[in-house]
Amino acid sequence: LPKTIEWVNGRVRMINQLLLPYKLEYIETDDPFRVAEAIKRMEIRGAPAIGVAAAFGMALAALKVQERSLKETLNVLERTAEMFKETRPTAVNLFWAVNRMMAVARSATSLEELVKSMISEAEKIALEDEKANRRIGELGSRLLSDGDTVVTICNAGSLATTYYGTATAPIYVAKEKRINVRVIAMETRPYLQGSRLTAFELKLAGIPVSVITDNQIGVIMEKEKVDIVFVGADRVVGDGHVINKIGTYPLALVAKEHGVPFYVAAPTSTIDLEHDIEQIVIERRPSSEAAELFGRRLCPEGVDYIYYAFDITPPRLVTGIITERGIAYPPYPKSLKELV
Amino acid sequence: LPKTIEWVNGRVRMINQLLLPYKLEYIETDDPFRVAEAIKRMEIRGAPAIGVAAAFGMALAALKVQERSLKETLNVLERTAEMFKETRPTAVNLFWAVNRMMAVARSATSLEELVKSMISEAEKIALEDEKANRRIGELGSRLLSDGDTVVTICNAGSLATTYYGTATAPIYVAKEKRINVRVIAMETRPYLQGSRLTAFELKLAGIPVSVITDNQIGVIMEKEKVDIVFVGADRVVGDGHVINKIGTYPLALVAKEHGVPFYVAAPTSTIDLEHDIEQIVIERRPSSEAAELFGRRLCPEGVDYIYYAFDITPPRLVTGIITERGIAYPPYPKSLKELV
């Protein structure tokens, strides 16, 4: 599998995911605004990858403004940080990564140190992501047996992270251990991350994968043998509420109904102990993003699509939350606090 | 609203629904094989409309073979009946309408009588459908209050029937009574009957309608005020199991979870007292029908879509079944038997 996002000689290089599965093309830039644009346009997406992109974007900003004084530079960086935080309001990793970059910036005693330490911090964030996913993969792979069928939604795959992915990591690690599983990927309208991205990367990795339309989650529990569900998370609240791609909540409900274990794979950076579920804003995106596909309108002119990009899965539907520090089981207020 | 299917001077005239919402175009034919083809290709769809189409198709067949002897004609019609029954295996109305046409054919004592009675029987089936829907609309409209929000799936609309629709009939009748409701239509992948057809006909009728991707059924129960769900049915088994368009079962599950009443609107011709749910075959359609849209592939080459066209909603998730003879409430084995 190719790396999703990398720092290459003072530039950020990332796969343009809007072109998959037709073309594997990269965006390479030294412009932090271009990185912010990529996050907004969803050329790069997936909570961990967005965090890494914002960290690299902050490092690019530091490189750009290094001729000014330390104080001036910090002022500019503060504004850049705000810009990055506004690109996708739901992704907690984004805030976490940007705040971490700003903490490093503030502790620098010279411009030279600031630039150097911000680049190294961004690279550290990327490497930590990869390592966390590898660990999630090891823990999660123990839940899998040879011949299992796994259902997943959206792309919490390698493409959503620096490498390995979150929901896919157990599958990749299982394959290394010669535990062969089959995956059913929900297509995940409107962006079709499941059919475009998850199917793309799993096929590339030699893992058998089928796609379903999102409305087949019920019938496949009856007609196909489903052993386990793995999903990612954009944010996990301290009490165990999971904010993830639209469709996760109905999937969890159906899984519960059929006694199929439902696991969330998420690095601890996704866990938000500071907010209650009531405080979380569910991102609404423009109607046209759902109403149009390949430049064609799916509904009559004058009719709008409602487009909530995420939904909320209540803790009682979640079997476990796999983090790089261990698997949290209910009651989540206790288990998540212990892990973080 | 235009009629979906009509008998016009020895020909069948029906809207080509694959072209909606872009073009309102008709298929007009005197060829029973063309009618069967239209059912197979889903140019005409919706359980009641399919039944009417097959009835008209049988009448066309009778017109075609009238020069032979009565016995020979019946033999040909038996084969034509089999052909129609094979076009869509899940639609019980299809079997019901074809069997009814054959019963009329068998009781004819002359060729002339056979042709005349089959045409008149087919027209009767169409008229009965319209009347049944009108009655379903009257009963269902009593469940609606001004300002309500209704969720529906697929197109159990006027376009799925001769006129009025089943799930939409209560909405149309409510509008006549100045009870104004708002509809949220699930887009219903892969054919997008919700966004293409339901949104089209409701907008044409002046009813406010928004579309959602199928995976938003969970979040809208939280974020939008939803008062009631109306769905159609391809088949209702005697114990209350509802076979309907893929996605109905997860919708029913979410509705139950949120205490939203879930009603099935279906004429008694859809009720099947002869089979158990275990005997029902859920139609699987070709992978390409889900994997391609507007001639473009949604997933990488070499990856298949699973495509079950229907799912099964268990009786305990169904608040009531609205038929033209009254609303059936649980326990269904008793209430459905009484109605039929």
Image (cartoon, coloured by chain):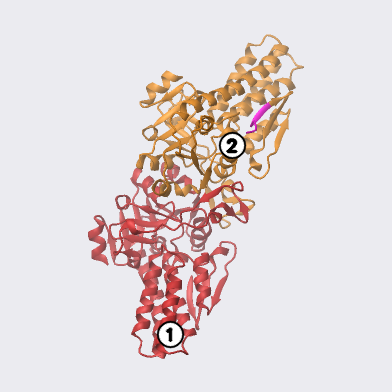
Chain colours: A orange, B red
Residue A272 percent location from the top left of the image: 47, 25
On the question of residue A245 being in view, the answer is yes
Q: Is residue B316 left or right of residue B212?
A: left
Rendered view: B150 above or below A143: below
Residue B173 percent location from the top left of the image: 39, 64
Residue B251 is labelled as none
Q: State yes or no: residue B243 in magenta.
A: no
Rendered view: A225 above or below B16: above
Look at 58% across and 19% down and name the residue there: A100
Residue pointed to by mark 1 = B73
The chain letter under disc 1 is B
Look at 38% across and 57% down and name the residue there: B243
Q: Main secondary structure of the magenta part?
A: loop
Going by the numbered disc 1, the residue's amino acid type is Thr
The magenta stretch spans which residues?
Answer: A1-6
Q: Is residue B288 left or right of residue B283?
A: right
Identify the image quadrant of the C terminus of chain B. Answer: bottom left
Q: Tell me the distance, in whole angstroms, between the alpha carbons under discs 1 and 2.
A: 60 Å
Residue B290 percent location from the top left of the image: 54, 53
Label 1: how many Cα within 10 Å (few below 14, some 14–19, many 20+): some
Q: Where is residue A197, by image quadrant?
A: top right
Which one is in front, B239 or A203?
A203
Residue pointed to by mark 2 = A205
Q: Is residue A95 left or right of residue A250?
A: right
Q: State yes or no: residue A2 in magenta.
A: yes
Residue A125 percent location from the top left of the image: 60, 21
On the question of residue B163 being in view, the answer is no
